[in-house]
Amino acid sequence: MNPSLYLRDPEQSELGKNIIKHSIQLIHDNGFEAFTFKKLAESIGTTEAGVYRYFENKHKLLIYIISWYWGWIQFQLNYQTNNIKDPIIKLKKVITLLSSNVEDDIATGHVDESQLHQILISEGSKAYLTNHVEKDNQQEFFKPYKDLCNSVGDIILECNPKYKYPHSLASTIIEMAHLQNFFMNHLPSLTDFSKSKSESEIIKYLEDLVFNAIRD
Amino acid sequence: MNPSLYLRDPEQSELGKNIIKHSIQLIHDNGFEAFTFKKLAESIGTTEAGVYRYFENKHKLLIYIISWYWGWIQFQLNYQTNNIKDPIIKLKKVITLLSSNVEDDIATGHVDESQLHQILISEGSKAYLTNHVEKDNQQEFFKPYKDLCNSVGDIILECNPKYKYPHSLASTIIEMAHLQNFFMNHLPSLTDFSKSKSESEIIKYLEDLVFNAIRD
DNA sequence: TTTCAAATAATAGTATTACTATCATAAATA
DNA sequence: TATTTATGATAGTAATACTATTATTTGAAA
């Protein structure tokens, strides 16, 4: 985890872990706009100043938990595609991993991956859609996201080494896995998944899109 | 324009038009987060209360100018594809229209379409990525966007009536035309367009993606 | 065991934001 | 001319996003 994101490492104390845990809960429940350090402190049972000792502001905290998520997804990707040879199957695994509702991993006590997945869908793009993207990017805040995009791009190139847009297709898959999910649930007429409300439909759409794009 | 978006119609007065004009300028220059009614009022030479007489809050004002933009794009789409028979050419026109940097239309004195296009790229998704999407949707705030998505979906179906995901593909085109542009300019490693920084590369990518998706 | 540093809790305070309310005046309209 | 209607000017409030200070607790080194 990039140390520029925090003032004190939240993994190293109970209070720190509580900050992460309750942030995820509150952002999941009320959205990032309604999320404040005051409410967070109340929810934990500490004070606003206590939270500020860990994070400079709520934007860095958001990037922290988003980075956590992408790191976890990267791990899942590596783990799940580890001993698969066929890049087509790998790419299908990736699409499924990015599109599916995640179940909470109990190994990570203070992080609810299922809620994090929902946060990524609704709030993920707010991490970079700011006036200070480039400053944040210089500080490597988006490295986990870019690493994942590169990994997916590599798998795309394994499928078809001549495909011209591996990175753009990778970022399209990642973003659309989330955005089509958001649309399906909130603005269904922007999708073709209105009736089922099932992620499997999104997976089918993305597989169709991707494998037609990369076939020779 | 949906009257629920405003308290007083900004098209009907000089002050109203100034609110639109300076909002576009300020949001373009400093981003939506940094945009406040106080700064807007100062920039116009009126008071905060004056702005509040036209718009309940800055979120509705954002949706107003975004709706304006989608209405304008819809008009351009209709105009540009009006007497084209070949749906393939129509769809190419649509991709180009959505991806290209717009030049300011001097016919609309108080609206700078070029700045609006930039706003859509950086701030567009913030219109719906909120906790109150569904409430906003019930009030038809996203109708211009949905109408456009439907129009594009119809053209996709003209190209291939059997294609299964016309709406999802339409929303993918619209969103990716903007997002790949944002990435190209701010996070280029998420794309394959880093060197040229030219919209024509995005158009090629989207055409490749779309026409491979819909071919029989 | 003392001692010292680090972390936390408690409290206070500031500037800005996102509004609401009031009242006077100017312009348009009936 | 009387009367709405829009605007301007000013004030005020609650919440947000912080910063600062001091006191207390805790845990590790001497």
Image: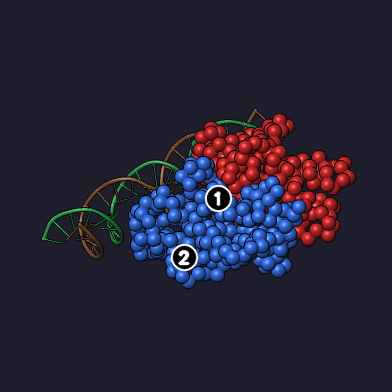
Chain colours: A red, B blue, C brown, D green
Q: Are marks 2 and 1 in contact (CB under 8 Å)?
A: no
**Residue furthest bottom in the image:** B106
In primary-sequence order, the first of circles 2 and 1 is 2
Q: Is residue B206 visible?
A: yes
Identify the residue under disc 2. Answer: B111
C-alpha separation, residue under disc 2 versus residue under disc 1: 22 Å
Secondary element at tag 2: loop
Q: Residues within 10 Å of mark 1 (few under 14, many from 20)?
A: many
Secondary element at tag 1: helix
Q: Position of residue B134 (x, y in %)?
A: 51, 41
Q: Chain of mark 2?
A: B
Q: Quadrant of residue B100?
A: bottom right
Relative to D2, residue A9 above or below:
above
Which numbered marker is on residue B146? 1
Relative to B23, is B214 on the left or the right? right
Amino acid tagged 2: Val
Relative to B67, residue B76 above or below:
below
Q: Residue at x 78, y 42 (%)?
A: A93
Amino acid tagged 1: Lys
Q: Residue at x 57, y 64 (%)?
A: B82
Q: Residues within 10 Å of mark 2 (few under 14, many from 20)?
A: many
Closest to the observer, A22 or B142: B142
Closest to the observer, B89 or A133: B89
Q: Residue at x 48, y 62 (%)?
A: B24
Q: Position of residue A143 (x, y in %)?
A: 71, 52
Q: Position of residue A64 (x, y in %)?
A: 64, 46
Relative to A147, is D1 on the left or the right? left
Q: Chain of mark 1?
A: B
Q: Quadrant of residue C12?
A: top left
Q: Is residue A179 visible?
A: no
